[in-house]
Image (cartoon, rainbow, N blue to C red):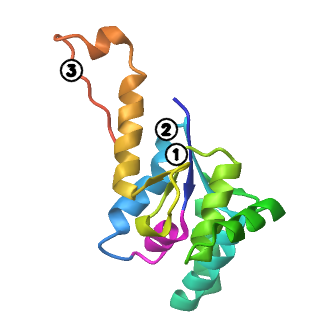
Amino acid sequence: MELNLLIDTNVVVDSFLEREPFLSMSRRAISLSRQYPNVRNFISASTVTDIYYITYRALKNRQIVRGLFINLFEFVRVVTVTDKDIHDAFALNWKDFEDSVQYSVAKSNRFDGIVTRNMQGFADDEVKIFTPEECSAEILRELYKSLPDEIRKSNDVGTVITVPAA
């Protein structure tokens, strides 16, 4: 199982600013790549500037914001936004341009999905869109599928798959 996911701006901001009631599931979705090496999380380069601006405006402390990003970059990779991604985003003509850029980046990089709280912002279905809760469930389904048949079909063996705490 290999799962490459683009994490949307709102999920990272929820984690950075500890926004309830979204904090727990957003942190879990972001941190799954720490526990499961076959899960790779990405954010787009344009998202970095958006997240920095929103977080700095709320916290007004450059060192804290830098620390949040340094920690994030330990397990979330930054992916380039290309000229083609921008043109493709404009061609989508969606109401929310930031969502169209995210979608175009995910599509051009052949990611398995986008993790977001803003489900209605994405109007195309070539890239799967997951809420943070759905992301966690999808990873568990994929992990279960990767277990050997003798474990999955045995009545004598119990299977426990853990999801990291937020």
Name the amino acid, label 2.
Tyr
Residue 7 visible to the viewer: yes
Looking at the rendering, the stretch of residues picked out in magenta corresponds to 8-18
In the displayed structure, 112 sits above or below 55; it is above
Q: Outermost residue toward the left?
A: 155
- Disc 1: which residue: 33
Question: Residue 128: percent from the left, percent from the top?
Answer: 49, 49
Residue in the picture at 55% in, 33% down: 2
Instruction: Check disc 2: other Cα within 10 Å, few if <14, some if 14-19, many if 20+.
Output: some
Mark 3: which secondary structure?
loop
Residue 88 location, quadrant: bottom right
Q: Residue at x 61, y 46 (%)?
A: 111
Report whether 71 appears left or right of 131.
Answer: right
Considering depth in this image, is 66 or 131 the residue closer to the camera? 131
Q: Main secondary structure of the magenta part?
A: helix
- Answer above or below: position of 11 versus 49: above
Say which residue label 3 marks: 158
